[in-house]
Each structure stands twice: as structure tokens, then as C-alpha cells.
Amino acid sequence: MMGKTFVRLGVNIDHVATLRQVRKAVEPEPVAAAVAAEMAGADQITVHLREDRRHIQNRDVRLIREVVRTALNLEMAATAEMQEIALALRPDAVCIVPERREEITTEGGLNLVDASPSLGEMVATLKDADIHVTAFLDPDLRQINEAARFRFDAVEMHTGAYANAPRGRRDAELKKLKEAAEAIRHLGMRVHAGHGLDYHNISPLLTVPDLEEVNIGHSIMARAIMVGMDRAVRDMLHLLGRV
């Protein structure tokens, strides 16, 4: 009998900073949130340093890098500024994501089909610095093939369509994720997933083959407001079969 798949949990703490930035205040403190999530069992802390700095700030990432004892995953746009920051901070991993100023949250995956060759240079530079590099992609086989061409280490599948699908469409969206995961693994990359995942839709996702990591933010932060960070993280770990 095959052993149970171990799925790592990355906890995205961006919205702790969102709440702070609403008032331009000093609290709540994202660094404290990172420590609390890690103590509750998170395998990784994820932050998105957006170009417009709408939530996480440079000092947050710098301090979190110093205190995190598991792993730091930095979500970032493919820009020279962000590459410079990543090389200075040396997170354990970066996830390259698309950004649009007017979006509320990341609305889709990268378009690698039309990406500049300079992206390949960025991926190589980050990997040479011993940083694990992930592409955030829709479950689209053309994009996945391009990720392999650019030599990404992993693909984080954008699970928004699955998470937001009405009940009658969710199985079809889950099937797309499974097919995408098979292609990702066949091409020698690791399979990650994230966006819109919560306590209600995470369990079916665990049937995706070779899934190694999920990154979850909003739903965990929303529950943490009500029950505390420790309980919110442990509840998700329980659904992942970890506790």
C-alpha cells in the first residue's frame, strides 16, 4: 500500500499587513503572525511583496527572513527590483506571479507563452543563488510546457477556478488540476497549488497526484480573527491529514 502523501502548508500572512496598512499603524505585526503560524505547525511562511506595497513592506520581509525557522516563500513579480530584493534576502523560495495595479488579488497565472527571454535569465540567476523558483500558472498545458522550457523548479497551480466554481462545475475544474499536475510532474517539476483554498474545498484537492505544497492565506487569516492563529493553522493541518 502506498504511503499517504505529505502536503506542506505554506501560510500566507499578507492580510495581517493589509489590516495594519488600512490605518498606517504599527499593528497587527506580520512578523508576530509569522512566528505564531510557524509555532502552530506551518511548514512555510509566504508573503507577497507587491510593487505597490499595498500590504507587505520591505521591512516586513527583512524581519521575517531573520525570524522564520522553517522556510520563507517570497511571491514577486518578474522585475529587476524584485530580483535584487530576492538576491539580497535569500528566501528559501520565490514564486513568480503576475501583477496588475487595479486587481484586488492575483487574478490569474503568468503568461509564459509570450514571456521575454529575460525571464529565463532571472530564473537561472535565482537558482544559482540556491533559491527554489516556482511559476504561478493556470492549469494550462501550454503554460506548463513553457515553465519547463524556462527551467522552473515547480509550478504552483492557480486554483481560483476550482475554488470559485459552483458545485456542479467543481469536479470538472478538479479534473483540470489533476491533468495539469500529471504534466508538471512528467516534465520534472514539483506540483504546488494555491489561491482561494479554504477549509471547505481543500480535501478534494488532496486527490491531485503528486501535490507537494499548498499556500493558503485569506481563509486562514479570516479564521484566525475568530479563533486565533494557532487554532486556524492547526485546523488546516488537520484537513491535510497532518495532525
Image (cartoon, helix red, strand yellow):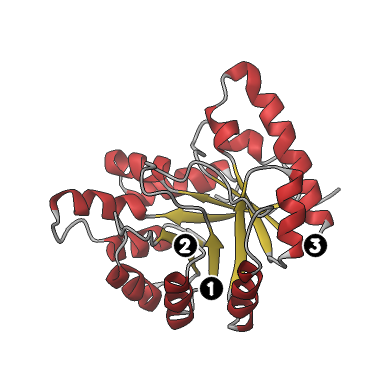
Q: Position of residue 184 (x, y in %)?
A: 76, 53
Q: Position of residue 35 (x, y in %)?
A: 35, 65
**Does residue 201 appear anywhere in the picture?**
no
N-term-proximal mark, 2 vs 3:
2
In the image, farthest residue toward the top:
168
For the residues bearing labels 2 and 3, Cβ distance under 8 angstroms:
no
Q: Which residue is mark 2?
A: 76
Helix, strand or loop at label 2? It is strand
Which residue is located at x 38 percent, y 62 percent?
49
Number of residue marks: 3
Kind of residue at disc 3: Gly
The front one of 1 and 9 is: 9
Q: Which residue is mark 1?
A: 92
Return the mark for residue 188: 3
Mark-to-mark CA distance, 2 and 3: 23 Å
Which residue is located at x 37 percent, y 41 percent?
104
N-term-proximal mark, 1 vs 3:
1
Task: From this view, report whether residue 53 is shown above or below residue 159.
Answer: below
Task: From this view, report whether residue 130 is shown above or below residue 143.
Answer: below
